Image (cartoon, coloured by chain):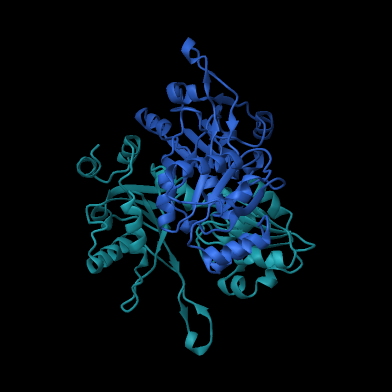
Chain colours: A cyan, B blue
Amino acid sequence: MLYIIGLGLCDETDITVKGLEAIKSCEKVYLEAYTSILMVSKENLERFYGKELIIADREMVESQSDEILLNADSLNIAFLVVGDPFGATTHTDLVIRARELNIPVTVIHNASIMNAIGACGLQLYNFGQTISIPFFTDTWKPDSFYDRIKENRDLGLHTLCLLVKEQTIENLARGKKIYEPPRYMTINKAIQQLFEIEETRKQEIYTPESLAIGIVRLGSLTDQQIKVGTLNQLLTQDFGPPLHSLVIVGSRVHVLEIDFMRFFAVDKQVYNEIVKKDYDI
Amino acid sequence: MLYIIGLGLCDETDITVKGLEAIKSCEKVYLEAYTSILMVSKENLERFYGKELIIADREMVESQSDEILLNADSLNIAFLVVGDPFGATTHTDLVIRARELNIPVTVIHNASIMNAIGACGLQLYNFGQTISIPFFTDTWKPDSFYDRIKENRDLGLHTLCLLVKEQTIENLARGKKIYEPPRYMTINKAIQQLFEIEETRKQEIYTPESLAIGIVRLGSLTDQQIKVGTLNQLLTQDFGPPLHSLVIVGSRVHVLEIDFMRFFAVDKQVYNEIVKKDYDI
Protein backbone atom coordinates (compact mmCIF):
# COMPACT_ATOMS: atom_id res chain seq x y z
CA MET A 1 0.00 0.00 0.00
CA LEU A 2 1.20 3.49 -0.85
CA TYR A 3 0.01 6.00 1.76
CA ILE A 4 0.10 9.61 0.65
CA ILE A 5 -0.25 11.57 3.86
CA GLY A 6 -0.79 15.28 4.40
CA LEU A 7 1.23 16.75 7.27
CA GLY A 8 -0.81 19.92 7.63
CA LEU A 9 0.44 23.43 8.03
CA CYS A 10 3.08 23.76 10.65
CA ASP A 11 4.66 21.28 13.03
CA GLU A 12 4.81 17.56 13.87
CA THR A 13 1.52 17.59 15.81
CA ASP A 14 -0.46 18.80 12.80
CA ILE A 15 -0.61 15.29 11.40
CA THR A 16 -3.94 13.49 11.88
CA VAL A 17 -4.23 10.54 14.22
CA LYS A 18 -5.10 8.46 11.15
CA GLY A 19 -1.99 9.67 9.36
CA LEU A 20 0.23 8.95 12.35
CA GLU A 21 -1.15 5.41 12.66
CA ALA A 22 -0.48 4.84 8.97
CA ILE A 23 3.14 6.04 9.27
CA LYS A 24 3.72 3.70 12.18
CA SER A 25 2.63 0.79 9.96
CA CYS A 26 5.09 1.67 7.18
CA GLU A 27 8.41 0.08 6.28
CA LYS A 28 9.69 3.15 4.49
CA VAL A 29 8.69 6.79 4.95
CA TYR A 30 9.52 9.40 2.32
CA LEU A 31 9.24 13.13 2.99
CA GLU A 32 8.49 15.24 -0.06
CA ALA A 33 10.76 18.19 0.39
CA TYR A 34 10.94 20.43 -2.61
CA THR A 35 7.58 22.06 -3.25
CA SER A 36 6.79 23.31 0.19
CA ILE A 37 8.15 24.05 3.63
CA LEU A 38 7.26 22.61 6.99
CA MET A 39 8.03 24.83 9.95
CA VAL A 40 9.72 21.99 11.81
CA SER A 41 12.96 20.06 11.41
CA LYS A 42 13.27 16.59 9.92
CA GLU A 43 14.74 15.41 13.25
CA ASN A 44 11.65 16.54 15.17
CA LEU A 45 9.43 14.69 12.74
CA GLU A 46 11.55 11.54 13.04
CA ARG A 47 11.44 11.65 16.83
CA PHE A 48 7.67 12.18 16.85
CA TYR A 49 6.91 9.45 14.30
CA GLY A 50 9.52 7.05 15.63
CA LYS A 51 10.65 6.48 12.04
CA GLU A 52 13.57 7.48 9.89
CA LEU A 53 12.59 9.75 7.02
CA ILE A 54 14.00 9.56 3.51
CA ILE A 55 14.07 12.95 1.82
CA ALA A 56 12.42 12.77 -1.59
CA ASP A 57 13.82 15.61 -3.67
CA ARG A 58 12.51 16.78 -7.00
CA GLU A 59 14.85 14.47 -8.87
CA MET A 60 13.56 11.41 -7.01
CA VAL A 61 9.85 12.19 -7.28
CA GLU A 62 9.96 13.18 -10.92
CA SER A 63 12.26 10.60 -12.39
CA GLN A 64 12.75 7.84 -9.84
CA SER A 65 9.21 7.32 -8.64
CA ASP A 66 9.59 3.57 -9.17
CA GLU A 67 12.16 3.58 -6.40
CA ILE A 68 9.59 5.04 -4.01
CA LEU A 69 7.03 2.49 -5.17
CA LEU A 70 9.42 -0.44 -4.85
CA ASN A 71 7.72 -3.29 -2.96
CA ALA A 72 4.66 -1.13 -2.19
CA ASP A 73 2.55 -4.02 -3.50
CA SER A 74 3.51 -6.08 -0.47
CA LEU A 75 4.78 -3.52 2.08
CA ASN A 76 3.38 -0.24 3.40
CA ILE A 77 5.22 2.80 2.09
CA ALA A 78 4.42 6.37 3.19
CA PHE A 79 4.93 9.49 1.15
CA LEU A 80 4.55 12.58 3.34
CA VAL A 81 3.48 15.89 1.87
CA VAL A 82 3.32 19.26 3.62
CA GLY A 83 -0.26 20.56 3.71
CA ASP A 84 -2.70 18.31 1.84
CA PRO A 85 -1.49 15.70 -0.68
CA PHE A 86 -3.46 17.42 -3.42
CA GLY A 87 -2.98 20.95 -2.15
CA ALA A 88 -0.90 23.56 -3.86
CA THR A 89 1.05 20.94 -5.75
CA THR A 90 -0.51 17.74 -6.91
CA HIS A 91 1.22 14.46 -6.79
CA THR A 92 -0.86 13.20 -9.62
CA ASP A 93 2.08 11.62 -11.36
CA LEU A 94 2.99 9.36 -8.47
CA VAL A 95 -0.61 8.16 -8.09
CA ILE A 96 -0.93 7.41 -11.80
CA ARG A 97 2.34 5.47 -11.74
CA ALA A 98 1.20 3.48 -8.68
CA ARG A 99 -2.04 2.56 -10.44
CA GLU A 100 -0.13 1.39 -13.50
CA LEU A 101 1.81 -0.92 -11.20
CA ASN A 102 -1.42 -2.09 -9.51
CA ILE A 103 -0.30 -0.70 -6.17
CA PRO A 104 -3.21 0.34 -3.95
CA VAL A 105 -3.09 4.01 -2.91
CA THR A 106 -4.60 5.56 0.20
CA VAL A 107 -4.69 9.31 0.63
CA ILE A 108 -4.94 10.83 4.11
CA HIS A 109 -5.96 14.46 3.88
CA ASN A 110 -5.01 17.45 5.97
CA ALA A 111 -5.31 21.21 6.08
CA SER A 112 -3.51 23.26 3.44
CA ILE A 113 -3.28 26.95 2.66
CA MET A 114 -6.10 26.39 0.13
CA ASN A 115 -8.70 25.96 2.86
CA ALA A 116 -6.99 27.31 5.99
CA ILE A 117 -6.83 30.72 4.30
CA GLY A 118 -10.40 31.09 5.64
CA ALA A 119 -8.67 32.13 8.89
CA CYS A 120 -8.38 35.63 7.42
CA GLY A 121 -12.14 35.96 7.75
CA LEU A 122 -13.14 35.89 4.09
CA GLN A 123 -15.64 33.24 3.02
CA LEU A 124 -14.00 30.57 0.89
CA TYR A 125 -17.01 30.68 -1.46
CA ASN A 126 -15.91 34.05 -2.76
CA PHE A 127 -12.38 33.14 -3.73
CA GLY A 128 -11.63 32.86 -7.43
CA GLN A 129 -8.75 30.94 -8.89
CA THR A 130 -5.52 30.76 -6.91
CA ILE A 131 -2.31 32.10 -8.41
CA SER A 132 1.42 31.69 -7.78
CA ILE A 133 3.79 34.62 -7.94
CA PRO A 134 7.28 33.57 -9.07
CA PHE A 135 10.53 35.48 -8.64
CA PHE A 136 11.21 37.93 -11.45
CA THR A 137 14.67 38.25 -12.91
CA ASP A 138 16.02 41.07 -15.07
CA THR A 139 15.09 39.19 -18.20
CA TRP A 140 12.24 36.90 -17.09
CA LYS A 141 9.07 38.45 -15.72
CA PRO A 142 6.24 35.99 -16.35
CA ASP A 143 3.01 37.88 -15.77
CA SER A 144 0.16 35.56 -16.70
CA PHE A 145 -1.00 35.76 -13.07
CA TYR A 146 -2.00 39.36 -13.82
CA ASP A 147 -4.71 38.08 -16.17
CA ARG A 148 -5.93 35.61 -13.55
CA ILE A 149 -6.21 38.42 -10.96
CA LYS A 150 -8.14 40.47 -13.52
CA GLU A 151 -10.56 37.59 -14.14
CA ASN A 152 -11.16 37.23 -10.41
CA ARG A 153 -11.54 40.94 -9.76
CA ASP A 154 -13.93 41.43 -12.69
CA LEU A 155 -16.22 39.00 -10.83
CA GLY A 156 -15.65 40.61 -7.43
CA LEU A 157 -13.75 37.55 -6.18
CA HIS A 158 -10.75 37.36 -3.87
CA THR A 159 -7.39 36.12 -5.12
CA LEU A 160 -5.15 33.92 -3.01
CA CYS A 161 -1.56 34.53 -4.11
CA LEU A 162 0.80 31.71 -3.19
CA LEU A 163 4.32 32.98 -2.74
CA VAL A 164 6.57 30.26 -3.90
CA LYS A 165 9.66 28.63 -2.62
CA GLU A 166 12.22 28.59 -5.36
CA GLN A 167 15.09 26.22 -5.85
CA THR A 168 17.25 27.26 -8.73
CA ILE A 169 19.57 24.84 -10.34
CA GLU A 170 23.26 25.60 -10.41
CA ASN A 171 25.86 23.90 -12.52
CA LEU A 172 23.23 22.81 -14.99
CA ALA A 173 25.53 23.60 -17.88
CA ARG A 174 28.01 21.16 -16.46
CA GLY A 175 25.37 18.46 -16.30
CA LYS A 176 25.15 18.40 -12.51
CA LYS A 177 21.82 18.97 -10.88
CA ILE A 178 22.83 20.86 -7.75
CA TYR A 179 20.07 22.86 -6.17
CA GLU A 180 20.76 26.19 -4.51
CA PRO A 181 19.29 26.73 -1.06
CA PRO A 182 15.63 27.73 -1.51
CA ARG A 183 14.57 31.36 -1.56
CA TYR A 184 11.18 32.28 -0.17
CA MET A 185 9.14 35.05 -1.69
CA THR A 186 8.06 37.64 0.88
CA ILE A 187 4.79 39.54 0.82
CA ASN A 188 6.80 42.72 0.31
CA LYS A 189 8.60 41.35 -2.73
CA ALA A 190 5.35 40.01 -4.18
CA ILE A 191 3.64 43.41 -3.85
CA GLN A 192 6.65 45.11 -5.41
CA GLN A 193 6.35 42.75 -8.39
CA LEU A 194 2.58 43.28 -8.57
CA PHE A 195 3.22 47.04 -8.83
CA GLU A 196 5.89 46.45 -11.47
CA ILE A 197 3.48 44.45 -13.63
CA GLU A 198 0.65 46.97 -13.17
CA GLU A 199 3.11 49.65 -14.31
CA THR A 200 3.63 47.72 -17.56
CA ARG A 201 0.11 46.43 -18.19
CA LYS A 202 -1.74 49.54 -16.97
CA GLN A 203 -5.22 47.98 -16.77
CA GLU A 204 -5.71 49.21 -13.21
CA ILE A 205 -6.64 45.77 -11.98
CA TYR A 206 -5.45 46.86 -8.55
CA THR A 207 -3.89 50.03 -7.18
CA PRO A 208 -1.64 50.84 -4.20
CA GLU A 209 -4.92 51.55 -2.36
CA SER A 210 -6.47 48.12 -2.97
CA LEU A 211 -7.34 46.16 0.16
CA ALA A 212 -5.20 43.09 0.82
CA ILE A 213 -4.29 40.62 3.54
CA GLY A 214 -0.86 39.33 4.45
CA ILE A 215 -0.86 35.93 6.15
CA VAL A 216 2.35 34.47 7.52
CA ARG A 217 3.18 31.17 9.18
CA LEU A 218 -0.48 30.14 8.96
CA GLY A 219 -1.29 27.39 11.44
CA SER A 220 1.45 28.22 13.93
CA LEU A 221 -0.12 28.61 17.38
CA THR A 222 2.62 30.96 18.53
CA ASP A 223 3.75 32.71 15.43
CA GLN A 224 0.90 33.14 12.95
CA GLN A 225 0.30 36.69 11.81
CA ILE A 226 -2.47 38.26 9.76
CA LYS A 227 -2.27 41.89 8.66
CA VAL A 228 -4.93 43.75 6.70
CA GLY A 229 -4.23 46.95 4.83
CA THR A 230 -3.78 48.51 1.42
CA LEU A 231 -1.13 46.98 -0.83
CA ASN A 232 0.89 50.12 -0.16
CA GLN A 233 0.64 49.67 3.60
CA LEU A 234 1.57 45.99 3.46
CA LEU A 235 4.53 46.76 1.16
CA THR A 236 6.50 48.17 4.09
CA GLN A 237 5.35 45.87 6.92
CA ASP A 238 7.84 43.46 8.44
CA PHE A 239 6.32 39.99 8.26
CA GLY A 240 9.31 37.99 9.51
CA PRO A 241 10.33 34.51 8.31
CA PRO A 242 8.42 32.33 5.77
CA LEU A 243 5.87 31.17 4.72
CA HIS A 244 4.09 34.24 3.42
CA SER A 245 0.82 34.41 1.48
CA LEU A 246 -1.17 37.32 0.15
CA VAL A 247 -4.88 37.77 -0.52
CA ILE A 248 -6.13 40.54 -2.78
CA VAL A 249 -9.63 41.26 -1.48
CA GLY A 250 -12.41 41.32 -4.07
CA SER A 251 -15.55 43.43 -3.97
CA ARG A 252 -17.93 40.68 -2.80
CA VAL A 253 -17.68 41.07 0.94
CA HIS A 254 -20.22 40.82 3.71
CA VAL A 255 -20.35 43.22 6.64
CA LEU A 256 -19.34 40.38 9.00
CA GLU A 257 -16.20 39.81 6.95
CA ILE A 258 -15.41 43.52 7.14
CA ASP A 259 -15.80 43.37 10.94
CA PHE A 260 -13.61 40.29 11.13
CA MET A 261 -10.81 41.83 9.07
CA ARG A 262 -10.86 45.08 11.06
CA PHE A 263 -9.29 43.20 13.96
CA PHE A 264 -6.19 42.64 11.80
CA ALA A 265 -6.01 46.14 10.26
CA VAL A 266 -2.54 47.67 10.44
CA ASP A 267 -4.24 51.08 10.75
CA LYS A 268 -7.92 51.04 11.74
CA GLN A 269 -8.57 54.60 10.53
CA VAL A 270 -7.18 53.95 7.06
CA TYR A 271 -9.07 50.63 7.01
CA ASN A 272 -12.37 52.33 7.80
CA GLU A 273 -11.79 54.94 5.09
CA ILE A 274 -11.00 52.27 2.45
CA VAL A 275 -14.01 50.23 3.49
CA LYS A 276 -16.29 53.25 3.21
CA LYS A 277 -14.86 54.30 -0.16
CA ASP A 278 -14.51 50.89 -1.86
CA TYR A 279 -17.07 48.70 -0.12
CA ASP A 280 -19.79 51.14 0.83
CA ILE A 281 -19.97 49.61 4.33
CA MET B 1 -9.07 29.99 25.73
CA LEU B 2 -11.59 29.12 23.04
CA TYR B 3 -10.28 26.38 20.78
CA ILE B 4 -12.02 26.06 17.44
CA ILE B 5 -10.96 22.69 16.14
CA GLY B 6 -11.49 21.11 12.75
CA LEU B 7 -12.40 17.40 12.85
CA GLY B 8 -11.58 16.67 9.24
CA LEU B 9 -13.60 14.70 6.79
CA CYS B 10 -14.76 11.41 8.11
CA ASP B 11 -14.20 9.65 11.44
CA GLU B 12 -12.73 10.15 14.92
CA THR B 13 -9.14 9.51 13.80
CA ASP B 14 -9.21 12.39 11.31
CA ILE B 15 -8.54 14.90 14.07
CA THR B 16 -4.97 16.19 14.26
CA VAL B 17 -2.73 15.24 17.16
CA LYS B 18 -2.66 18.95 18.05
CA GLY B 19 -6.45 19.08 18.03
CA LEU B 20 -6.75 15.97 20.18
CA GLU B 21 -4.29 17.38 22.75
CA ALA B 22 -6.30 20.60 22.88
CA ILE B 23 -9.58 18.73 23.47
CA LYS B 24 -8.03 16.80 26.32
CA SER B 25 -7.14 20.11 28.00
CA CYS B 26 -10.70 21.44 27.81
CA GLU B 27 -13.36 21.69 30.51
CA LYS B 28 -16.22 21.78 28.05
CA VAL B 29 -16.38 20.45 24.50
CA TYR B 30 -19.08 21.58 22.08
CA LEU B 31 -19.79 19.79 18.80
CA GLU B 32 -21.19 22.01 16.07
CA ALA B 33 -23.88 19.87 14.57
CA TYR B 34 -26.06 21.68 12.12
CA THR B 35 -24.04 22.78 9.12
CA SER B 36 -22.30 19.58 8.29
CA ILE B 37 -22.17 15.85 8.82
CA LEU B 38 -19.49 13.67 10.33
CA MET B 39 -19.54 10.04 9.25
CA VAL B 40 -19.19 8.81 12.82
CA SER B 41 -21.45 8.78 15.88
CA LYS B 42 -21.23 11.19 18.81
CA GLU B 43 -20.59 8.20 21.07
CA ASN B 44 -17.55 7.11 19.07
CA LEU B 45 -16.14 10.62 19.28
CA GLU B 46 -16.73 10.76 23.03
CA ARG B 47 -15.02 7.43 23.58
CA PHE B 48 -12.05 8.46 21.46
CA TYR B 49 -11.64 11.90 23.06
CA GLY B 50 -12.43 10.71 26.57
CA LYS B 51 -14.79 13.68 26.90
CA GLU B 52 -18.50 14.26 26.93
CA LEU B 53 -19.71 16.32 23.97
CA ILE B 54 -22.35 19.01 24.13
CA ILE B 55 -24.27 19.30 20.88
CA ALA B 56 -24.36 22.92 19.70
CA ASP B 57 -27.38 23.30 17.45
CA ARG B 58 -28.14 26.26 15.23
CA GLU B 59 -30.14 27.95 17.98
CA MET B 60 -27.25 27.78 20.43
CA VAL B 61 -24.52 28.97 18.07
CA GLU B 62 -26.54 31.78 16.58
CA SER B 63 -28.27 33.22 19.60
CA GLN B 64 -26.65 31.75 22.71
CA SER B 65 -22.98 32.04 21.82
CA ASP B 66 -22.29 33.68 25.19
CA GLU B 67 -23.22 30.38 26.82
CA ILE B 68 -20.49 28.63 24.80
CA LEU B 69 -18.04 31.38 25.70
CA LEU B 70 -18.92 31.34 29.42
CA ASN B 71 -15.73 31.21 31.51
CA ALA B 72 -13.55 30.79 28.40
CA ASP B 73 -11.43 33.63 29.75
CA SER B 74 -10.20 31.36 32.54
CA LEU B 75 -10.97 27.82 31.31
CA ASN B 76 -10.31 25.99 28.05
CA ILE B 77 -13.42 25.48 25.95
CA ALA B 78 -13.44 23.55 22.66
CA PHE B 79 -15.80 24.08 19.76
CA LEU B 80 -15.52 21.23 17.27
CA VAL B 81 -16.38 21.72 13.63
CA VAL B 82 -16.58 19.07 10.92
CA GLY B 83 -13.97 19.73 8.22
CA ASP B 84 -12.03 22.93 8.77
CA PRO B 85 -13.29 25.65 11.14
CA PHE B 86 -13.42 28.13 8.28
CA GLY B 87 -14.43 25.65 5.62
CA ALA B 88 -17.76 25.64 3.89
CA THR B 89 -19.35 27.55 6.71
CA THR B 90 -17.50 30.14 8.67
CA HIS B 91 -17.84 30.58 12.35
CA THR B 92 -16.95 34.21 12.01
CA ASP B 93 -19.66 35.30 14.41
CA LEU B 94 -18.40 33.24 17.32
CA VAL B 95 -14.83 34.49 16.84
CA ILE B 96 -15.94 38.12 16.68
CA ARG B 97 -18.01 37.67 19.85
CA ALA B 98 -15.06 36.04 21.64
CA ARG B 99 -12.82 38.96 20.70
CA GLU B 100 -15.38 41.42 22.03
CA LEU B 101 -15.22 39.57 25.35
CA ASN B 102 -11.39 39.55 25.24
CA ILE B 103 -11.32 35.76 25.10
CA PRO B 104 -8.25 34.38 23.30
CA VAL B 105 -9.10 32.17 20.32
CA THR B 106 -6.97 29.41 18.84
CA VAL B 107 -7.94 27.77 15.58
CA ILE B 108 -6.70 24.27 14.76
CA HIS B 109 -7.14 23.56 11.09
CA ASN B 110 -7.99 20.36 9.25
CA ALA B 111 -8.93 19.07 5.83
CA SER B 112 -12.27 20.08 4.35
CA ILE B 113 -14.01 19.42 1.07
CA MET B 114 -12.61 22.76 -0.14
CA ASN B 115 -9.08 21.37 -0.42
CA ALA B 116 -9.58 17.58 -0.28
CA ILE B 117 -11.57 17.83 -3.51
CA GLY B 118 -8.14 17.72 -5.17
CA ALA B 119 -8.48 13.93 -4.74
CA CYS B 120 -10.53 13.92 -7.95
CA GLY B 121 -7.34 14.76 -9.84
CA LEU B 122 -8.10 18.31 -10.90
CA GLN B 123 -5.62 21.00 -9.86
CA LEU B 124 -7.04 23.25 -7.15
CA TYR B 125 -5.60 26.26 -9.02
CA ASN B 126 -8.20 25.88 -11.72
CA PHE B 127 -11.28 25.88 -9.54
CA GLY B 128 -13.43 28.99 -9.63
CA GLN B 129 -15.86 30.00 -6.93
CA THR B 130 -17.62 27.26 -4.99
CA ILE B 131 -21.41 27.05 -5.03
CA SER B 132 -24.11 25.42 -2.91
CA ILE B 133 -27.12 23.77 -4.47
CA PRO B 134 -30.20 23.98 -2.22
CA PHE B 135 -33.35 21.87 -2.39
CA PHE B 136 -35.97 23.28 -4.74
CA THR B 137 -39.62 23.31 -3.75
CA ASP B 138 -42.62 23.78 -6.04
CA THR B 139 -42.61 27.50 -5.37
CA TRP B 140 -38.99 28.24 -4.41
CA LYS B 141 -36.24 27.56 -6.92
CA PRO B 142 -33.34 29.88 -6.11
CA ASP B 143 -31.00 29.78 -9.09
CA SER B 144 -28.27 32.34 -8.46
CA PHE B 145 -25.76 29.45 -8.50
CA TYR B 146 -26.45 29.21 -12.24
CA ASP B 147 -24.79 32.61 -12.73
CA ARG B 148 -21.82 31.55 -10.64
CA ILE B 149 -21.36 28.41 -12.77
CA LYS B 150 -21.54 30.57 -15.88
CA GLU B 151 -18.85 32.90 -14.52
CA ASN B 152 -16.58 29.95 -13.80
CA ARG B 153 -17.21 28.24 -17.13
CA ASP B 154 -16.66 31.43 -19.12
CA LEU B 155 -13.13 31.37 -17.66
CA GLY B 156 -12.64 27.65 -18.21
CA LEU B 157 -12.66 26.98 -14.45
CA HIS B 158 -14.08 24.02 -12.55
CA THR B 159 -17.04 24.44 -10.20
CA LEU B 160 -17.26 22.61 -6.90
CA CYS B 161 -20.94 22.19 -6.06
CA LEU B 162 -21.58 21.57 -2.37
CA LEU B 163 -24.73 19.58 -1.85
CA VAL B 164 -26.24 20.82 1.33
CA LYS B 165 -27.71 19.24 4.34
CA GLU B 166 -31.06 20.81 5.01
CA GLN B 167 -32.88 21.12 8.26
CA THR B 168 -36.30 22.59 7.78
CA ILE B 169 -38.18 24.04 10.64
CA GLU B 170 -41.55 22.56 11.56
CA ASN B 171 -44.11 24.13 13.79
CA LEU B 172 -42.69 27.57 13.14
CA ALA B 173 -46.16 29.04 12.93
CA ARG B 174 -46.81 27.79 16.43
CA GLY B 175 -43.66 29.48 17.66
CA LYS B 176 -41.76 26.30 18.31
CA LYS B 177 -38.41 25.80 16.67
CA ILE B 178 -38.47 22.08 16.01
CA TYR B 179 -36.09 20.92 13.32
CA GLU B 180 -37.04 18.09 10.99
CA PRO B 181 -34.45 15.36 10.52
CA PRO B 182 -31.92 16.60 7.97
CA ARG B 183 -32.24 15.75 4.31
CA TYR B 184 -29.09 15.31 2.25
CA MET B 185 -28.96 16.35 -1.37
CA THR B 186 -27.79 13.58 -3.65
CA ILE B 187 -25.71 14.04 -6.77
CA ASN B 188 -28.66 12.71 -8.76
CA LYS B 189 -31.05 15.28 -7.33
CA ALA B 190 -28.53 18.09 -7.84
CA ILE B 191 -28.08 17.19 -11.51
CA GLN B 192 -31.86 16.98 -11.98
CA GLN B 193 -32.14 20.51 -10.57
CA LEU B 194 -29.25 21.72 -12.74
CA PHE B 195 -31.13 20.45 -15.80
CA GLU B 196 -34.32 22.11 -14.59
CA ILE B 197 -32.60 25.48 -14.27
CA GLU B 198 -30.87 25.14 -17.65
CA GLU B 199 -34.32 24.42 -19.13
CA THR B 200 -35.54 27.77 -17.79
CA ARG B 201 -32.46 29.92 -18.30
CA LYS B 202 -31.40 28.39 -21.64
CA GLN B 203 -27.89 29.89 -21.77
CA GLU B 204 -26.31 26.49 -22.44
CA ILE B 205 -23.86 26.90 -19.59
CA TYR B 206 -23.70 23.14 -19.42
CA THR B 207 -25.44 20.32 -21.26
CA PRO B 208 -26.26 16.68 -20.46
CA GLU B 209 -22.95 15.88 -22.20
CA SER B 210 -20.80 18.11 -19.97
CA LEU B 211 -18.06 16.32 -18.07
CA ALA B 212 -18.55 16.10 -14.31
CA ILE B 213 -17.27 14.26 -11.25
CA GLY B 214 -19.33 12.78 -8.44
CA ILE B 215 -17.44 12.46 -5.13
CA VAL B 216 -19.05 10.70 -2.19
CA ARG B 217 -17.91 10.12 1.38
CA LEU B 218 -14.62 11.86 0.64
CA GLY B 219 -11.93 10.91 3.15
CA SER B 220 -13.40 7.52 4.07
CA LEU B 221 -10.71 4.87 3.66
CA THR B 222 -13.26 2.16 3.02
CA ASP B 223 -16.15 3.91 1.42
CA GLN B 224 -15.00 6.87 -0.67
CA GLN B 225 -16.17 6.84 -4.28
CA ILE B 226 -15.28 9.01 -7.24
CA LYS B 227 -17.12 8.64 -10.54
CA VAL B 228 -16.39 10.59 -13.69
CA GLY B 229 -18.86 10.93 -16.53
CA THR B 230 -21.23 13.23 -18.33
CA LEU B 231 -23.94 14.86 -16.23
CA ASN B 232 -26.36 12.52 -17.98
CA GLN B 233 -24.35 9.44 -17.01
CA LEU B 234 -23.98 10.54 -13.40
CA LEU B 235 -27.70 11.31 -13.17
CA THR B 236 -28.51 7.61 -13.00
CA GLN B 237 -25.56 6.30 -10.98
CA ASP B 238 -26.17 4.97 -7.49
CA PHE B 239 -23.85 6.84 -5.15
CA GLY B 240 -25.15 5.47 -1.85
CA PRO B 241 -25.36 7.38 1.44
CA PRO B 242 -24.17 11.00 2.05
CA LEU B 243 -22.13 13.15 1.77
CA HIS B 244 -22.24 13.81 -1.96
CA SER B 245 -20.41 16.52 -3.89
CA LEU B 246 -20.29 17.36 -7.57
CA VAL B 247 -17.64 19.00 -9.73
CA ILE B 248 -18.50 20.45 -13.13
CA VAL B 249 -15.25 20.20 -15.06
CA GLY B 250 -14.09 23.38 -16.81
CA SER B 251 -12.12 23.60 -20.03
CA ARG B 252 -8.71 24.30 -18.45
CA VAL B 253 -7.40 20.78 -18.00
CA HIS B 254 -3.98 19.27 -18.40
CA VAL B 255 -3.37 15.92 -20.03
CA LEU B 256 -2.23 14.50 -16.66
CA GLU B 257 -5.58 15.46 -15.16
CA ILE B 258 -7.37 13.75 -18.03
CA ASP B 259 -5.32 10.59 -17.39
CA PHE B 260 -6.05 10.76 -13.68
CA MET B 261 -9.80 11.12 -14.18
CA ARG B 262 -9.94 8.26 -16.70
CA PHE B 263 -9.35 5.87 -13.82
CA PHE B 264 -12.72 6.92 -12.37
CA ALA B 265 -14.69 7.01 -15.63
CA VAL B 266 -18.01 5.16 -15.42
CA ASP B 267 -17.58 4.29 -19.12
CA LYS B 268 -14.05 4.66 -20.52
CA GLN B 269 -15.20 4.70 -24.14
CA VAL B 270 -17.69 7.52 -23.59
CA TYR B 271 -15.06 9.32 -21.53
CA ASN B 272 -12.50 9.12 -24.33
CA GLU B 273 -15.03 10.42 -26.85
CA ILE B 274 -15.98 13.38 -24.64
CA VAL B 275 -12.34 14.19 -23.98
CA LYS B 276 -11.57 14.13 -27.69
CA LYS B 277 -14.58 16.27 -28.58
CA ASP B 278 -14.51 18.83 -25.75
CA TYR B 279 -10.89 18.88 -24.63
CA ASP B 280 -9.02 18.09 -27.82
CA ILE B 281 -6.81 15.63 -25.91
- Name the residue nearer the viewer: B34 or B194: B194
In the rendered structure, the answer to whether residue B252 lies left or right of residue B215 reads left
Is A132 rendered above or below residue B232?
A: below
- Name the residue nearer the viewer: B212 or A130: B212
x%, y% of residue B5?
53, 38
Is A227 rendered above or below residue B58?
A: below
Q: Furthest residue to the top?
A: B174
In the rendered structure, the answer to whether residue B129 lies left or right of residue A255 reads right
Q: Furthest residue to the bottom?
A: A174
- Name the residue nearer the viewer: B52 or B188: B188
Is A102 rendered above or below residue B160?
A: below
x%, y% of residue A59?
58, 75
Residue A30: image quadrant is bottom right
* Residue A72 seen anywhere in this rendered image of the structure: yes
x%, y% of residue A245?
39, 56
x%, y% of residue A115?
48, 48
* Residue A53 seen anywhere in this rendered image of the structure: no
Q: Quadrant of the C terminus of chain B?
A: bottom right
In the rendered structure, the answer to whether residue B248 lies left or right of residue B52 reads left
